[in-house]
Amino acid sequence: RGESLDIHFESDCEFVIIGGDKMPEGRLMHWNFVSTSSEKIEKAKVDWDEQRFPKIPGEVGFVPRPR
């Protein structure tokens, strides 16, 4: 907080900054799945891969989960 950072790129790239308060103890995270249960995270991975999540209206295509 209150500090600055200079970032320079040598070529085209994609860059993401993620910040915020530290997650509470016991929270697990995989990609955009967050839970206190590893079983729920594993189920979410399978459900995502098999495209069982509700579709976003107007959205086309599928974004594969990072491995």
Image (spheres, rainbow, N blue to C red):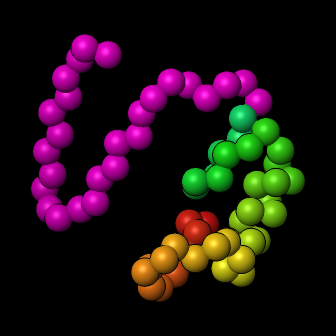
Q: Could you tell me if residue 45 is visible in this image? A: yes
Query: Residue 62 or 13: which is nearer the viewer?
Result: 62
What residue do we see at 32% from left, 16% from top?
1
What residue do we see at 13% from left, 45% from top?
8
Residue 13 horizontal side relative to residue 51, left or right: left
Tell me residue 11's x, y (percent): 14, 62
Task: Name the outermost residue toward the top.
Answer: 2
Based on the picture, tell me whether residue 42 belongs to the magenta stretch.
Answer: no
Rendered image quadrant of residue 53: bottom right
What residue do we see at 29% from left, 53% from top?
15
Vertically, is 6 above or below 59? above
Residue 53 horizontal side relative to residue 62, left or right: right
Tell me residue 3's x, y (percent): 23, 17
- Where's the C terminus, which quadrant? bottom right
Magenta stretch prevailing secondary structure: loop
Rendered image quadrant of residue 66: bottom right
Q: How many marks?
A: 0
Tell me residue 37's x, y (percent): 83, 44
Based on the picture, tell me whether residue 19 belongs to the magenta stretch.
Answer: yes
Q: Which residues are magenta?
A: 1-26
Vertically, is 65 above or below 34? below
Tell me residue 26's x, y (percent): 76, 30
Q: Could you tell me if residue 49 is visible in this image? A: no
